[in-house]
């Protein structure tokens, strides 16, 4: 692990467990995840759907309805404030101001009966206590800042009148409106066209550097990670498999799952390679395999992997891995 | 929008015409007539004279055309059962109690039902949710004459708090208004609950929470407004249906309202009154649905600002 910085981490998650009881049995979405984010840092959380990456972020924002969600953690904090103990008013103040979030599908992220301008202004009036007029002007500035063409028209538009790319830009504008110290981006480009994806990623990266805020990029796409973050957490079956700097992850992946994930990126090294896939499917979260969650699909697994879950060990270089085959 | 409204108005006129033909012919197709021997036997020649006097000896299409010509000039004729006044005078007189009692019933029942439905949606699986479900189910399944009877038994017979029947003094209004209010309340409790739950599960609500909006503001500003759009459209037809009187409620509480005339005009073969009642109801329902549709479009930006994605 990197030496603890003097500043308090923006996001701190220690041994988080999230479960959803259902008729067919309890779904264990997150099983002992720990991660942290320093001010100004950018972290990617990568994993397949169902790996618990979104749920972990939703948990630290306290956006999971509980009940039904059962959340427990040694520590769950935003800007040093324990969100498990925080009251309603504290949470309202933390959300939007300390931490903001953008979501996967911009088409359904806005209230259909209010204009974009009204919805951005609402946030400004709430957190920055602006008047109607000032909030509208600031909303216009924000739309310009996210490089929306004819921001005046977009301000007066209803969500159904705009394209997905425009809406995602507007959502970023809304998320950044109150200068959050950390931005959670939950698959922000998955629902968009490929050409728009690159623009949105570039925009997020630029704004992050410009505003000096922390970024947590949740994605299943290794390409997105490579372009946007400094450090990567690889998740599988509700657990952290590996955590390292982005260059280390790409050049010296240690965990078999990380290696398999990288091997399945098409067209790597420019060669005409066959597309490699990871055999098998994601583990059933209501009945996770014993031992290492990846062992049923791991080419290197042995009896010990099936019997006993490997601990997440930290090496001298700060890299963390949870694998019996890897000595950090 | 203007074109749409004009097209709809044309369709209202067509509906009105079709209903008038149907009712007129069905009314005359029932065997017998207003001056048949029965309650007051008259000699055959007197009967013929009466028929001629009311124009009932002419061919049916002539009668229809003459009647509709009158309708266009707002002349609905004279009711057979009360020849001292015109049909319009009778309707104006009898409608007041129905409008007051039924109208107040909806105006009180619908908001109460909405509140109940909201509370149920926000506190799912709590006692208030179960209460709302019970009210909705009982309100929609117990016939209104049973409700009326229970009200009279409880508040007039056992407790002796309120008069059981009549019209005039406002304390006589209370029980019939409560009886009228049950169905709008039950309907609105059910609709509101499901509309709110539907909206609460929309992704934009999570976005609103993530941006730090207090739950109160999320519910009252965003969720309520989205859920209310479909609810608004139910209101006018419900109001028309209730404020034209219920024969059961008016019979139980002996209210001199419009409700009883719907049945008595058919039983006594009171052609002018029967036609007037049915045409009035047709027109009011057509206009209520038209207004609801316009209101829906106006409240819903996805229709008001058509287009679609760029």
Image (cartoon, coloured by chain):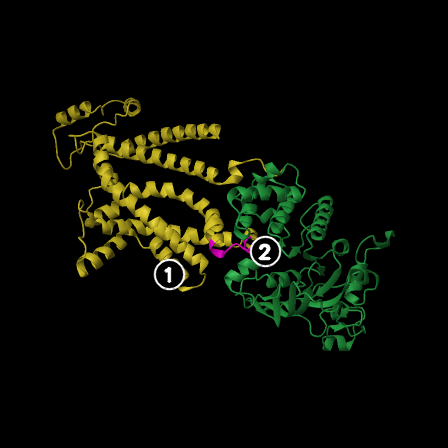
Chain colours: A green, B yellow
Q: Position of residue A211 (x, y in %)?
A: 68, 52
Left or right: A115, with A279 as reference point: left
Tell me which segment is drawn in magenta.
B208-216
Left or right: A137, with B166 as reference point: right
Numbered disc total:
2
Please give the chain letter of the residue carrying mark 1.
Answer: B
> According to the image, label 1 marks what residue?
B131
Left or right: A158, with A250 as reference point: left
In the image, B157 versus A212, the foreground residue is A212
Is residue A115 in view from this perspective? no
Residue B10: quadrant of the picture: top left
Q: Residue at x 51, y 60 (%)?
A: A89
Q: Position of residue A79 (x, y in %)?
A: 62, 63
In the image, A72 versus B116, the foreground residue is A72
Mark 1 and mark 2: Cα distance apart in space: 39 Å
Q: Residue at x 23, y 27 (%)?
A: B77
């Amino acid at each position: 692990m990197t030496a603890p910085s003097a500043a308090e981490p923006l996001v701190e998650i220690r041994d988080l467990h999230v479960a959803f009881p259902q008729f067919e049995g309890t779904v264990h979405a997150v099983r002992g995840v720990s991660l942290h984010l320093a001010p100004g840092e950018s972290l990617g959380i990568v994993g397949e759907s169902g790996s618990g990456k979104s749920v972990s972020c939703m948990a630290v924002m306290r956006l999971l309805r509980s009940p039904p969600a059962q959340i427990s953690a040694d520590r769950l904090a935003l800007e040093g404030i324990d969100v498990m103990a925080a009251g309603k008013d504290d949470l309202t103040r933390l959300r939007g101001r300390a931490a903001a979030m953008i979501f996967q599908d911009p088409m359904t992220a806005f209230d259909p009966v209010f204009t974009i301008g009204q919805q951005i202004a609402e946030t400004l009036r709430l957190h920055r206590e602006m008047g109607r007029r000032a909030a509208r002007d600031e909303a216009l500035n924000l739309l310009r800042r996210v490089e929306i063409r004819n921001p005046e028209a977009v301000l007066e538009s209803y969500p159904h009148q705009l394209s997905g790319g425009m809406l995602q830009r507007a959502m970023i504008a809304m998320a950044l409106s109150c200068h959050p110290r950390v931005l959670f981006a939950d698959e922000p480009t998955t629902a968009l066209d490929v050409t728009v994806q690159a623009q949105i990623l570039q925009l997020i990266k630029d704004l992050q550097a410009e505003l000096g805020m922390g970024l947590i990029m949740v994605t299943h796409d290794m390409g997105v990670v490579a372009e946007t973050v400094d450090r990567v957490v690889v998740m599988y079956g509700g657990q952290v498999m590996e955590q390292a700097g982005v260059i280390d992850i790409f050049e010296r992946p240690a965990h078999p799952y990380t290696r398999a994930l990288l091997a399945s990126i098409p067209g790597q090294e420019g060669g005409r390679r066959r597309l490699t896939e990871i055999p098998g499917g994601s583990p059933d979260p209501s009945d996770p395999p014993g031992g290492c969650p990846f062992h049923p699909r791991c080419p290197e697994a042995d009896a010990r992997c099936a019997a006993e879950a490997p601990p997440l060990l930290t090496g001298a270089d700060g890299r963390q891995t949870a694998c019996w085959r890897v000595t950090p | 929008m203007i074109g749409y409204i004009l097209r709809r108005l044309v369709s209202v006129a067509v509906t009105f015409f079709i209903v008038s033909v149907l009712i007129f012919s069905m009314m005359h197709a029932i065997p017998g007539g207003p001056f048949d021997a029965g309650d007051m036997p008259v000699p055959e020649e007197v009967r013929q004279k009466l028929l001629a006097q009311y124009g009932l000896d002419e061919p049916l299409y002539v009668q229809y055309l003459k009647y509709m010509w009158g309708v266009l000039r707002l002349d609905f004729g004279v009711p057979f059962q009360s020849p001292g006044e015109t049909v319009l005078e009778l309707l104006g007189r009898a409608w007041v109690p129905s409008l007051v009692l039924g109208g107040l019933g909806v105006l009180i029942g619908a908001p109460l039902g909405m509140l109940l439905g909201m509370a149920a949606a926000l506190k799912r699986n709590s006692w208030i949710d179960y209460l709302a479900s019970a009210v909705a189910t009982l309100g929609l399944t117990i016939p209104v004459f049973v409700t009326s009877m229970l009200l009279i038994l409880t508040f007039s017979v056992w407790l002796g708090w309120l008069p059981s029947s009549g019209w005039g003094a406002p304390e006589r209004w209370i029980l019939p208004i409560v009886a009228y209010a049950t169905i709008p309340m039950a309907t609105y409790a059910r609709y509101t609950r499901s509309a709110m739950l539907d909206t609460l599960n929309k992704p934009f609500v999570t976005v609103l929470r993530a941006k730090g909006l207090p739950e109160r503001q999320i519910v009252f500003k965003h969720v309520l407004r989205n859920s209310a759009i479909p609810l608004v459209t139910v209101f006018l037809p419900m109001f028309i249906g209730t404020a034209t009187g219920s024969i059961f409620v008016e019979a139980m509480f002996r209210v001199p309202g419009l409700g009883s005339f719907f049945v008595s005009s058919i039983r006594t073969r009171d052609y002018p009154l029967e036609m007037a009642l049915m045409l009035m109801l047709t027109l009011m329902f057509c206009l209520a649905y038209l207004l609801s549709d316009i209101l829906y479009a106006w409240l819903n930006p996805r229709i008001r600002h058509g287009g679609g994605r760029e």
